[in-house]
Image (cartoon, rainbow, N blue to C red):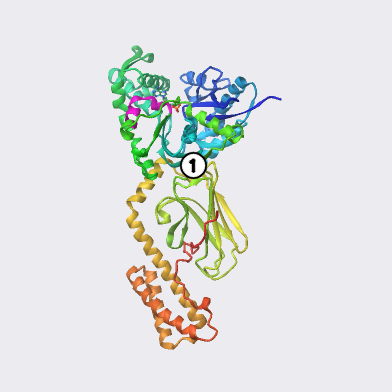
Amino acid sequence: MAKEFVVGIDLGTTNSVIAWVKPDKTSEVIANAEGARTTSSVVSFSKTGEIIVGEPAKRQAVLNSDRTIRSIKRKMGTDSKNSIDGKDYTPQEISSYILRKMVKDAEAYLGGTIKKAVITCPAYFNDAQRQATKEAGQIAGLEVLRIINEPTAAALAYGLDRKNDEKVVVYDLGGGTFDVSILEIGDGVIQVVSTNGNNHLGGDDFDKRVVDWLADNFKKEHGVDLRNDRQALQRLYEAGEKSKIELSTKMEADISLPFITATAEGPLHLEAKLTRATLESLVRDLVESTRGPVENALRDAKLNPSDINEVLLVGGMTRMPLVQQMIKTIFKKEGNKSINPDEAVAVGAAIQSSILSGEMGKDVVLVDVTPLTLGVEVKGGLLEPIIERNTPIPVKKAKVFTTAEDNQTEVEVRVYQGERKIASQNHMLGSFRLVGIMPAPRNIPQIEVSFDIDTDGIVNVNAKDLGTGKEQGMVVTGRNKLDPTEINKMVEEAKRNEEDDNRRKQEIEMKNQADNLVYSIEKILKENGDKIPGDLRSKVESLKNDLRDAVNKENIQRIKALMEELNQESMKMGEYLYKQPNANQDQQTPQNGDQNGPKTEDGNTYTAEYEDVK
Ligand code: AMP
């Protein structure tokens, strides 16, 4: 029987890498059939129907540009399709071709079969993107042991799991994504304390700047815009990337593209010289734009740059001197470049794959975190957090809620993600109804809402009526989820509006309390009104009516004053009732606490007052 191997795969936007852990416990990047340690994430469909992957696909991309697919990772988790010869290909299918080629080449090298793999993705990938990555692996015939975050993998590759009490930054600038993560390492545990980034920033954007510079100069000189010519544009991109790479080690790069286009007068050639200084001036803002996410990640981790023990450089773009300089200005120390930045992620994935398949004999726990708070809408439209931002995953948490109305037989669970106190100001992930709740007075039914985020970051939400055992749930579909730029925007917005939101929250809570007080008083009056002296009874009744009126009019000052007064009077009422024979404490105590049923727009609600389920 053929020997079976497990591997780690960095499925990158521009390049992908496959690695394994050898029997001597050292890791090795496996070169592809062309002898390269990285495989271009490019898939091309030849005119004869052949599917070409990697360097050969990239090379013929110029001639076959509309049948060549690059940077498919940016499309993962979307509905986008590539239509070739009348057949639609999903991003996961395209990605599976890349995986299949790498696996096939690695199998040839290892002399066995590869059935299981750990695949990496950017820390900020949402559920749909993670699902799509997993599916790509499955379509390629792999059992995906786990999807892990790229920075976490990098830390493993650097062997940091063996360190104690280290605070580490992973700065990962690749071809299509930028991720920064703050990790805390100790006792063999790597914990991602915060993540930030921009999954629409990478080397491709740098290349575009060079391409525009070349095309603008060419247009000035020859009056022809090469960007309108697809083939010329491909060649410009290749030349742009090549010169950018060269300028990491040289001060000047010559660009020569003969016969780039032709006019009535004959062929035209592009000759240019790009200096490092010019390149830096073209891309300075892109490099600078990574500073904000770094600062945000530090702030979320409650750390200063000086607290950081090590900065790991990951991704090919970190070879650019300007990037390294910026890192040095932030952290006042050089980034660690001791592992090839293109390979660190795949090596870490390989280490993780061998840990998961039991080959490594040691137990490193990888912990990732949720980028935003997850919660449900409760009475008054408030957001009740269930899983706070930056909670390590996997995690399962639940809270018990109740109804806001008497005889309410269904509730709508509205799930939001975000840091604002008012639910609707956050990002709605979805909603579902739990029906068939046994009719009961409000505040009696117990509805447990649980959130379960698995190791791949996929969120399951479930609501269960603890009375009847009825349950209903949903998997958060990634289409509704956010990319890192939006996440940053939301966190910033929440900070800016914190004061206003807190005030609004207090007002809503006050209204909810008042509403509950009105409800409790009405109940007491209905059940025991005849035992209360007439003057007290009519005073309480009129205060209660006024309070209800104030609640309806949202007059907060008046609500506050009336509640105080009504509480005083209802206490007198309570005292009176307790003196009666057969007084029943439970029944008589007015409830004005926070244990109340929130009312959503359609009258459905929940209330928080619960325990977290472990
Ligand atoms: P990755 O996604 O980690 O494979 O990174 C690929 C990106 O890094 C591409 O945009 C490459 O052009 C870029 N890159 C690779 N090597 C270098 C280098 N020496 N200097 C600058 N950029 C590089």
Viewer-side residue, 270 vs 534: 534
Q: Which residues are magenta?
A: 315-327
Ligand 1 image position (quadrant): top left
Q: Relative to 175, is 289 on the left or the right?
A: left
The x and y percentages for residue 102 are 56, 25
Q: Is residue 475 magenta?
A: no
Q: Does residue 49 show up?
A: no
Q: At 51% from the left edge and 38% from the top edge, which residue is drawn? A: 188
Q: Is residue 614 above or below residue 560?
A: above
Q: Amino acid at mark 1?
A: Asp
Q: At 46% from the left edge and 19% from the top edge, which residue is drawn? A: 62
Q: Is residue 593 above or below residue 505?
A: below
Q: At 37% from the left edge and 27% from the top edge, which residue is drawn? A: 206
The x and y percentages for residue 105 are 58, 21
Overall secondary structure of the magenta section: helix
Q: Is residue 324 magenta?
A: yes
- Number of marks in the rendered image: 1
Residue bearing the label numbered 1: 368
Element marked by disc 1: strand
Q: Does residue 377 show up?
A: yes
The x and y percentages for residue 26 are 55, 25
Q: At 56% from the left edge and 32% from the top edge, which residue is drawn? A: 93
